[in-house]
Image (cartoon, rainbow, N blue to C red):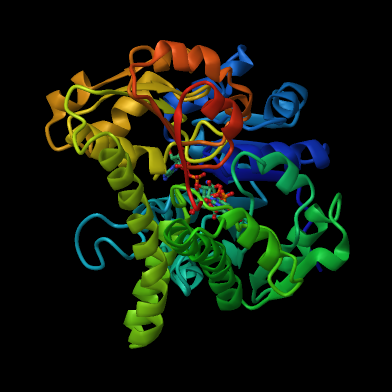
Amino acid sequence: MEHEIKKICCIGAGYVGGPTMAVIANKCTDIEINVVDINKDKIALWNSNDLSKLPVFEPGLKDIISKRRGINLFFSTLVEEKIAEADMIFLSVNTPTKIQGIGAGKAQDLKWIEASAREVAKFAKGTTIVVEKSTLPVKTAESIKKILDSSETNQDKIFHVISNPEFLAEGTAIADLENPDRILIGGESSDAIESLAQIYLNWVDSKKIIRTNLWSSELSKLTANAFLAQRISSINSISALCEATGANIHEVSLAIGMDKRIGSKFLNPGPGFGGSCFQKDILNLIYLCNFYNLNEVADYWEQVIKINSWQQKRITKIIVEKLFGTLTNKKIGIFGFSFKANTNDTRESPSIHICKDLIEEGAKLLIYDPKVSKEQIDYEFRSLVKNESKASGCWELKSSPYEASENSDAIVVMTEWKEFKNIDWHIISSNMRRPSWVFDTRNIVDKEFAIKSGLNFWEVGS
Ligand code: NAD
Ligand code: UGA
């Protein structure tokens, strides 16, 4: 018989933990949900009265937080207490790529997942369902179970570990959570699976809930991300061929996307995929394939990442070439720093890599992004640009695209924020030094308007 869930604890108040728990709290008002994190500053922001200060920007999130916070949704650092009270615990901690040691650069760093599993082992009471929400390598559930069952003090505790990967995309997280394509639950205990399914059944159609074994669930998450990223690398590879041949990538995307077997989504060319997950999850898949001696399979997926980096380098090279082969002392306006529109997340943003290369070529950048702070950009550059003092003196954050165009030689549109579609290119053009260029890496600019305003124009794939 499934266990009735009255209290949930989610470990990790990040881009997944925060929005996911907010939506569950909104749909299941009789369940108390506690989101806990070791990061005090982040928890303070989640509890801020000023909702524009929430650590995650997602359309629709503020409304839910204002409705449920303090009622059945709580954010705190009370890790021990909230674990002890919970019937069900979601592990929603970060799992970035390892930067040192065995598997560095490919395998996922599981230190945060292990630490949270140890906390659960220590503080949980009675029967507890532990849900893997983080994206994890295949067979991690087995390790979590070993940690949970290992402690001598755990004889009177019962743990069920199930996998429930999250498929939300940032920028549309709330809509994705409210209307998911599917809910995937993998595990051995059918009671535990049904307990979680009951929660989702409050708003998700039963036909969308898939039950699998643990390993299929873990592998499906990595595979879904690999397939999505593969489409982007495929279309980006063809964008280069379009530029060389005179074909137009939009016409090609439209033509192939109308084939129902291919489908129209995820065929937008751009500066390469960013975000905290695609690269990390493919690297992890590659690591797994190598581990199982499937080297050809590993090479196949590696190519998706290579094309992604190549696309970014290719765009930088085009910018340098068009600006007479040198960027020394040239000002370049960067429109957008987040990895996609409608998020304040900058992890693995293509902007970081392209900006870094432009800085190393000698350019001074004037950056504008509607949601990304100066501190965040500083943090991203500090770890990347070789000469730190050079990095800090080479860019400024501006408060509008118009300010970011003053005395510049070029504008590079990096993120598809809606406001960039409606820019007054006459004003931009009059602010710039001649000859002036616009490089549209997202193909969202009103091209005719820009050209009519006296600007030279380049866009990806045509
Ligand atoms: P994040 O970095 O935004 O949040 C993780 C949080 O966990 C951080 O606030 C961190 O302080 C906290 N944490 C780490 N160790 C802890 C511990 N021992 N106790 C308490 N708190 C701890 O990460 P995220 O983007 O939310 O991603 C979380 C997981 O979800 C990752 O595995 C990721 O691959 C997966 N995922 C992310 C997305 C996405 O869109 N970001 C989508 C689907 C799946
Ligand atoms: C992605 C997946 O879409 C989610 O299903 C998954 O849950 C999530 O990763 C995860 O595991 O973290 P996310 O990275 O938030 O979500 O955003 P996407 O919409 O997938 O965009 C990723 C990157 O690809 C962005 O840089 C975006 O600009 C780029 N992209 C996307 C393109 O260049 N072209 C496209 O057609 C689509």
Task: Identify the residue at image location x=60%, y=58%.
Answer: 267
Establish if 240 lies above or below 313.
below
The x, y position of residue 448, in whole percent, is 60, 31
- Please indicate, yes or no, whether residue 429 appears anywhere in the rendered image: yes
From the top left corner, tell me how far across and down residue 367 is, in percent.
38, 22
Q: Quadrant of residue 409?
A: top left
Please state the horizontal and vertical placement of residue 9, each as a whole percent of the image. Answer: 61, 44
Q: How many marks?
A: 0
207 w.r.t. 28: above or below:
below
Which residue is more in the foreground, 305 or 191? 305
- Say above or below: 45 vs 197: above
296 left or right of 239 in image: left
Residue at 61 percent across and 57 percent down: it is: 266
Image quarter of the N terminus: bottom right
Q: Pick the residue in front: 189 or 462.
A: 462
Instruction: Judge by depth and name the residue closer to the eye, 138 or 39.
Output: 138
Q: Position of residue 402 (x, y in %)?
A: 48, 13
